[in-house]
Amino acid sequence: MAVTIDASDARSIRAVELAAGASAWLKCWLADGCKAYGIRSSRDPSRFYLTNCESCTCYDFRRHQQHCKHVLAVRLHVELVRAGVVKAQAAPRRPEKRPSHDRRWNASTEPKSRTSVLGSRWDALGQLDG
């Protein structure tokens, strides 16, 4: 994928600035297995936009349906890594399918009965049932 930077386009210039700070991006895997980046909003530091080479969750991308500065920055970063100009940051490992139960669970941690957990309180409640 070729990335074209236009010096007269403010979006391109901002994308270059964002790509320079790629080491601060959050790296993650989406549920469908695709790699994405969390790029901090320039207006609201508590907000991150989930971005990959094709889409972004920012308002500009949703409104105009064209590549925003975040998408351009990700594309530029990917090309720089491929060219060996910058070193790729280690992304988190792709999550493996985990069993539905907690691996730390074992029979010794499970209470044997309600009585063993509640003790005499359970006995007292049983007397109320009458």
Image: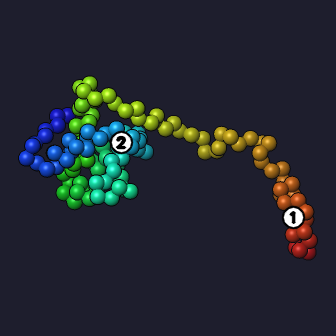
**Camera-side residue: 51 or 40?**
40
Examine the rendered structure and indicate whether residue 24 appears above or below residue 58: above
- Tell me the element at label 1: helix
Q: Is residue 32 visible?
A: no
Q: Quadrant of the N terminus?
A: top left
Residue at position x 84%, y 50% from top?
112
Examine the rendered structure and indicate whether residue 44 appears above or below residue 95: below
Q: Position of residue 23 (x, y in %)?
A: 34, 38
Q: Position of residue 106 (x, y in %)?
A: 74, 41
Q: Position of residue 53 (x, y in %)?
A: 27, 41
Q: Is residue 104 left or right of residue 27?
A: right
The residue wearing badge 1 is 122
Q: Are marks 2 and 1 in contact (CB under 8 Å)?
A: no
**Camera-side residue: 104 or 85?**
85
**Quarter of the view holding residue 12:** top left
Q: Residues within 10 Å of mark 2 (few under 14, many from 20)?
A: some
Task: Name the mark nearer the viewer: 2 or 1.
Answer: 2
Q: Residue furthest left?
A: 8
Residue at position x 18%, y 51% from top?
66
- Tell me the element at label 2: helix
Q: Label 2 vs label 1: CA separation? A: 54 Å
**Quarter of the view holding residue 98:** top right
Q: Quadrant of the C terminus?
A: bottom right
Residue at position x 92%, y 71% from top?
127
Q: Position of residue 15 (x, y in %)?
A: 21, 44
Q: Residue furthest top?
A: 84
The amino acid type found where label 2 is placed reads Ala
Q: Residues within 10 Å of mark 1 (few under 14, many from 20)?
A: few
